[in-house]
Amino acid sequence: MSTTTLEKPKRKTTKPFIPDLIYFEPAALDYPKGKRIHEWAEKEQIPIRITTSHNRITNLPGDTELEKYRNAKRTLVVGLRKTLKFDTSKPSAEYAIPISTGCMGHCHYCYLQTTLGAKPYVRIYVNTDDILEAAQGYIDERVPEITRFEAACTSDPVGIEHITGSLQDLITFMGKQEHGRLRFVTKYHHVEPLLNLEHNLHTRVRFSVNADYVIKNFEPGTSSFEERIEGASKIAKAGYPLGFIIAPIIWHEGWEQGYGELMEKLAEQVQVQDDTDLTFELIQHRFTKTAKRVIEQRYPKTKLEMDEAKRKYKWGRWGQGKYVYPDEQAEALRMFITEQIFLHFPDARIEYFT
Ligand code: SF4
């Protein structure tokens, strides 16, 4: 009799991010969070350097631009947030709350490629009290309206939470605010530090998910789909309002099957008690001419389709326009994904398609 058993394929485990190098602004060490991160870096035996400003890191290791870019993504810079004027963050929130800038992920399409330009390293800010005081000002200004803050506009804060603890501070703060709400999105599953906080339903955690083709080809350096779903189930169990962002929605061969399977897998695997407070946000892929140039330099083998001739040009408010899908394609994507969402989660809410 055969004793052979079918072995399950080994699942990938995405470990929490440990930088190769850490810079500190001297003033950051006057703050408890800065001190704590410094002690952690010493314990982890990560090389430490001092910099006069988190905006000027010029001597990163690497012989070529590409090597420098890759090393920058593995470099953490700990400093103070000096600009406490928050950017707006439509359509997902009123304001972007700045706790970190930059990300260790390597998503080919990421808009940080262009917005961060020559500074792709990961910056975190330790003067959290100043940031929260500014948030309080924005909340007070708008009372009795609710003010929503997006914490993931310029980074993926969950991926660095084990180092910063900043989301824990923000979630606890917003839990006590009658008129303040927090939201953030992630591609990482390291949510453990967030599970026992008094969030008071004031923080919505969203996971970025996508068709298999998109995750496999364009999202290196992030948690796998299965890991993200496990993270989402834990977040739902901890009572947080939960959401999914499907972004970027990419037109590819077999896209209907890909997005259909995505919704099936979500319905099967994510453990939500009831979907009346489940939200979806849908964002189609877009690129600018500058982004295309940068992406082609940094990921020269990318399969990301960025052919201007196949796209519709959308004029931008600040000058440079974007290339989106032509109306017919955008509409087909919107219709199909919307139908699939309501098929599997009839009570969920789609916040926007853009
Ligand atoms: S995880 Fe998010 S922030 Fe990080 S590279 Fe990917 S898209 Fe950009």
Image (spheres, helix red, strand yellow):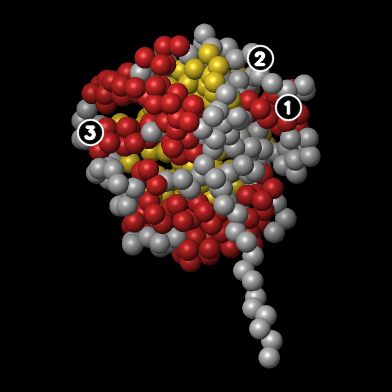
Residue 246 visible, this orientation: no
Residue that extends furthest to the top in the rendered view of this protein:
52
At horizontal 60% and vertical 59% (from top left) the residue drawn is 11
Tell me which image quadrant ligand 1 sits in: top right
Which of pointers 1 and 3 indicates the residue nearer the eye? 1
Marks 2, 3: nearer the viewer: 2
Q: Report the residue marked by disc 1.
A: 67
Q: Which residue is mark 3?
A: 177
Residues tagged 2 and 3 counted as in contact (Cβ below 8 A): no
Which residue is rendered at x = 64% and y = 78% of the image?
A: 5
In the rendered view, does 67 fall on the left or right side of 158? right
Quadrant containing the N terminus is: bottom right
- Any mark on residue 59, and which? 2
Q: Name the spot of residue 135 as percent of width and height, x first.
A: 31, 24
Q: Amino acid at mark 1?
A: Glu
Q: For the view shown, which residue lies furthest in the bottom direction?
A: 1
Report whether 135 appears left or right of 150. left
**CB of mark 2 near ligand 1 (< 8 Å):** no
Mark 1 lies on a secondary structure that is helix
Badge 2 or badge 1: first in the primary sequence: 2
